[in-house]
Image (spheres, rainbow, N blue to C red):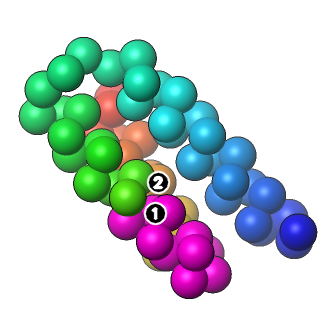
């Protein structure tokens, strides 16, 4: 795995861990949508889109 892919995978794990801890509600739903989009982009090997969606998920959790 390249460092960029490892970094995205680690970031995705971190976001998912924080998502799991978040209370149910619209924020958690929004983060889920960003996580799903990030997973789709990651599968397509689109690192830029993966990072964009993970950043959006992180921002939504803040």
- Magenta range is 37-48
Label 2: how many residues lie within 10 Å, few (<14), some (14-19) or many (20+)? many
Residue drawn at x 18%, y 33% as measured from the top left: 27
Whether residue 18 is visible, yes or no, is yes
Label 1: how many residues lie within 10 Å, few (<14), some (14-19) or many (20+)? many
Residue 38 is tagged as: 1
Q: Quadrant of the C terminus?
A: top left
Q: Secondary structure at mark 1?
A: helix
Relative to 19, is 30 on the left or the right? left
Q: Is 42 contained in the magenta span?
A: yes
Q: Secondary structure at mark 2?
A: helix
Residue drawn at x 27%, y 54% as measured from the top left: 33
Mark 1 or 2, closer to the camera: 1
Which is nearer the eye, 62 or 11?
11
Across and down, in percent, residue 21 comes to 41, 17
Taking 2 as reference, is 45 above or below it?
below
Residues at marks 1 and 2 touching, judged by CB atoms closer than 8 Å: yes
Residue 7 is tagged as: none
Across and down, in percent, residue 15 comes to 50, 38
Residue drawn at x 61%, y 40% as measured from the top left: 13
Whether residue 56 is visible, yes or no, is no
Residue drawn at x 53%, y 28% as measured from the top left: 17
* Magenta portion: prevailing SS class: helix
Residue assigned mark 2: 54
Taking 45 as reference, is 32 above or below it?
above
Residue 28, image quadrant: top left
Q: Is 32 contained in the magenta span?
A: no
Taking 56 as reference, is 62 above or below it?
above
| Mark toward the start of the polypeptide (1 vs 2) | 1
């Amino acid at each position: 795995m390249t460092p960029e892919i490892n970094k995205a995978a680690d970031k995705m794990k971190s976001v998912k861990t924080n998502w799991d801890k978040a209370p149910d509600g619209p924020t958690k739903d929004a983060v889920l949508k960003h996580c799903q989009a990030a997973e789709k982009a990651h599968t397509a090997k689109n690192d830029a889109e993966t990072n964009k969606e993970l950043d959006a998920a992180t921002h939504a959790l803040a």
